């Protein structure tokens, strides 16, 4: 039986996603080999795409309508890249996208821009993301590769994705393909 898309979209909860419990899980994946690693300077400014996503999150949070959620997902899926945070590790080869445990479920943390990822890492409540000089490493992937990576995590037991943790939204990974199909139908 097919689940109506409105149920799937309503099931996506927009919230202030401040995590209370983060535990790092190592989940290796071959698709990481083609990702770009980048250390971010605090001087970076928020770009227009970031402001647009923030506005769309605010609209979807306020209205809660499937239409506003679809617009938010469409903008997110059309970004050139998605960004992942990584815990500081002495060996750069041990750095993988961060998977945190919240409410006993593993979640991959995804960011729509590097600035949001950096802000999350630099928040003193979120320990272990900065090196001894205060720098952070962000793993950036083309959006389609990031989606493929996230979908592969679901088969390894990762429950969901938290987008722009702190002021964003989250979804079970199993809903990602139906969301993409729905957004593609509305183009």
Image (cartoon, rainbow, N blue to C red):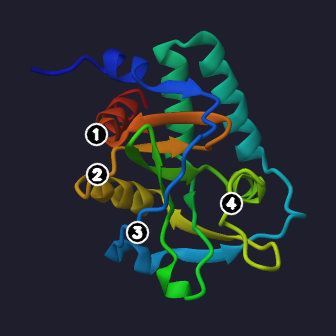
Whichever of callouts 3 and 1 sits on the residue coming sooner in the sequence is 3
Whichever of callouts 3 and 2 sits on the residue coming sooner in the sequence is 3
Secondary structure category for the residue under label 4: loop
What is the spatial separation of the Cα atoms under label 3 and label 2, in whole angstroms? 14 Å
Label 4 crowd bin: few (<14), some (14–19), many (20+), radius 10 Å: few
| Rendering quarter of residue 55 | top right
Location of the C terminus by quadrant is: top left
Please identify, in this view, whether the residue under mark 3 or under mark 2 is nearer the observer.
3
What is the spatial separation of the Cα atoms under label 4 and label 1, in whole angstroms? 29 Å
Secondary structure category for the residue under label 3: loop
Whichever of callouts 4 and 1 sits on the residue coming sooner in the sequence is 4
Residue tagged 4: 127
Residue tagged 1: 174
Label 1 crowd bin: few (<14), some (14–19), many (20+), radius 10 Å: some
Answer left or right for 16 relative to 186: right
What is the spatial separation of the Cα atoms under label 2 and label 1, in whole angstroms? 7 Å
What is the spatial separation of the Cα atoms under label 3 and label 1, in whole angstroms? 20 Å
Q: Residue at x 51, y 24 (%)?
A: 69
Residue tagged 3: 26
Nearer to the camera, 129 or 65 = 129
Residue tagged 2: 154
Q: Residue at x 34, y 43 (%)?
A: 173
Query: Relative to 61, is 174 above or below?
Result: below
């Amino acid at each position: 039986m097919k689940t109506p898309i409105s149920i799937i979209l309503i099931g996506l909860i927009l919230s202030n996603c401040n995590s209370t419990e983060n535990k790092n899980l190592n989940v290796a994946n071959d698709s990481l080999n083609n990702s770009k690693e980048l250390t971010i300077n605090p001087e970076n400014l928020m770009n227009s795409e970031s402001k647009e996503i923030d506005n769309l999150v605010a609209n979807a949070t306020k209205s809660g309508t499937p239409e506003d959620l679809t617009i938010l997902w469409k903008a997110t899926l059309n970004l050139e890249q998605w960004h992942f945070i990584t815990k500081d590790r002495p060996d750069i080869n041990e750095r993988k996208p961060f998977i945190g445990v919240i409410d006993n479920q593993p979640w991959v943390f995804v960011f729509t821009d590097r600035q949001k990822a950096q802000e999350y890492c630099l928040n003193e409540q979120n320990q272990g993301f900065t090196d001894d000089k205060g720098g952070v490493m962000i793993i950036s992937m083309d959006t389609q590769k990031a989606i493929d990576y996230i979908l592969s995590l679901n088969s390894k037991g990762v429950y969901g994705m938290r987008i722009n943790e702190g002021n964003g939204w989250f979804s079970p990974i199993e809903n990602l393909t139906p969301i993409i199909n729905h957004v593609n139908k509305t183009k």
